[in-house]
Amino acid sequence: MADFLNSYSIQRWLELCPQGYLEDTVYGHEEGESEAEVLLADDDLRTDAIRSTVQLVVGERAALAASSGLVNAAPDYPSKHFLATQTLDEARHVEIFTQRLFDLGVKKADLESTIDHFANPHLVKFAEVLLEKVDSGDFIAGVVGQNIVLEGLAFSVFEMMETSNRVSNPKFAHTLAGTIADERRHVGFGENRIGSLIKEHPEKKSEIEQMQKDMAYHMLKTFSLSFDEGRDNVDKARDVMGDVGSADFHGTDLSTATSEEMQTVLEQTVIGEFKTRLARIGLEYQAPVGV
Amino acid sequence: MSPEHDSDRADLGHPDPEFDPHALNQEDFLNEVHSFEFWFQAVEGYLRDRPYGHAEGEQSSPVGVADLGQSEKDSLITTLCNYCVGETAALEGASGMIAIAPNRHSKIFLATQVADEARHLEVFLHRLRDLGIANPEAEIERRANPTLLVFKRRLLELVRSGDWSAALLAQNVILESMEHSAFMVHAATADPVTAEILDGVMKDERRHLGFGENDLGRLLADHPGNRARLAGIRGELDGLVLAVFSRAADDLATDRSMRADMGREYLETMDRLGLV
Amino acid sequence: MNNQASTDPITQAVTTEEPRRTFELEDRGFREVPKKWRKFYRHWEGEDDWLGPNEIICPVCKVVIRSKRELRVGDRLYCMPCMSRMVVVEAQDGSLATEVIY
């Protein structure tokens, strides 16, 4: 067992999170912060915010199911400990994004129907591919799917959203900043723990690469549908929010970019990250066909 | 959809002189106590400045160990090894239950329990190293109580079968009750570091036990037809529970009155739930 | 947070002739719940300890539950540390006890 795993302990997690960057936060943001008034006042923008937040809840529910399912499949105590902290991180994310839906005006009684209504069907498929591996107790495929693919996706999406909300909606940006800090640990664990296991089990490579290809297909379809649905509101949001200054995300200014440009930079960023991370653990990125 | 600015939004941190928790309605109460935010602020109260479950100054020296005789030390190691077996069962059980939990609040609560159980496992492993055990995992395998291993296997079977009420009974009522009782009796006679670790663990167990009893109690109130089946599962597991208690009492050299205390809480809980 | 009395029948205590005493609660060092709730609970301190007229022991987790008001039969209480809901009842010896409500 590599000594580095000892740093993934509950003790370290307690020092980093509850006693670290989450201290004095309420539902992930500073106490007293609220959603931007202009967002709450405009039905189109509010509905758009609800739609995008629903995708975060769907993704985090999948991550919660996957990380908790992987605790049992983990072959050693440090991995179990780490996945236990990840389980709690994911539950926190489910809770804070659900809370954002309430803050955006979703009634508690309407929560599940709102999620069913807005959930992107491709994101649901993306989660199903992962959970099939987790349910079968396949630790290596499960961690690649969860901690490299899903978390890699979440990391870039959260970063992009955090960048574009930093000035216009600090409450949501602060919520996202805490989740990004969590995701850093999750992708780090994925790479560090799985690299050695892939070396020990080269026969698993083709099966895992197929899973990654399937997940990437549904991810790209998710992006495509999401940006299509939000396209009409991009200009309106800029009009309503006023000048928020430039917001650079990997060379693209999100404050002036078109919806197509935003989709392109997100896809390029996520796929670029996938290629780098997968290569580090000895896998080759498989581009999906038909998207 | 119209904005519903959350009038019942949790504000867990700042005392309001008018606030009275006993005046909450039940739904608000359950929303509150099953949340990450509640857990987060609760554990902050008793885990801060207690790395590995005890005060910082005691961290590097195995306080109290020097005072233990060889056989007492050996008994303590056996006991801690079996705590690790129980906590591993609880960790794997609680994490498996997230998938079958019937609602979001239960899933979030169980996620906090997963982290609690992993912490318990970690602090007991750390304590074993304090006691000079270089390879705790091998030691646990060597000293594990076979009956506890049977219980663990049965618990995980119930979880895997997707039977929420049976898994809740085995994990959050029976296993938690066994652990809490054993820790309580042990803490009364343990060396100071072990006692402090156990004290912190028992604070977590209160939430787990309470969640199990109350959720199962509500379920039985709504579906009384489940009672006979669950009483049957209790009956099946009772023999294992008694054997585990008996072995734990032997390891701890517990006197007669304390042995009775060990089983009392478990029996009282079953009585309140009507699983007799 | 909804602090209004609900329509739940068990929140309604049986009325008696005597007006209830009220109590100013202070923090007794109970750290197992968020700050806002701490003064409503304390640990039982053993044989030399005693319960005030506004205090009762949780039957599930054995911590002492405290109220701002003198307790009477029919009062509803919550134990936050173990998440139990209960109602105050009269024990066989005439003292106050609690019954868990699921």
Image (cartoon, rainbow, N blue to C red):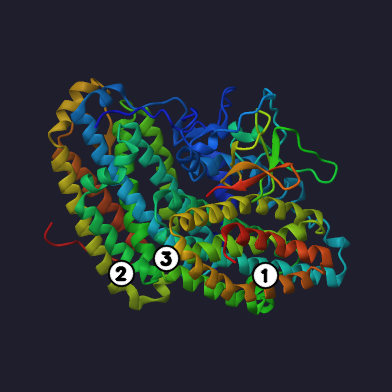
The residue indicated by pointer 3 is A194
The answer to whether A120 appears left or right of C36 in the picture is left
Q: Which mark is residue C49?
A: none
> Where does residue B124 sit, x and y in percent of width and height?
67, 61
The residue indicated by pointer 1 is B82
The residue indicated by pointer 2 is A208
Amino acid found under the numbered disc labelled 2: Ile
> Where does residue B22 sit, x and y in percent of width and height?
57, 34
Q: Nearer the viewer, residue A71 or A153?
A: A71
**Other-residue count near label 1 (Cα within 10 Å), few / some / many at <14 / 14–19 / ≥20:** many
**Quick one: SS at disc 2?**
helix
**Other-residue count near label 2 (Cα within 10 Å), few / some / many at <14 / 14–19 / ≥20:** some
Q: Mark 2 to mark 3: distance in Å?
A: 12 Å
The answer to whether A191 appears left or right of B156 in the picture is left
Camera-side mark, 1 or 2: 1
Taking the spot 84% from the left edge, 46% from the top edge, the residue there is C47
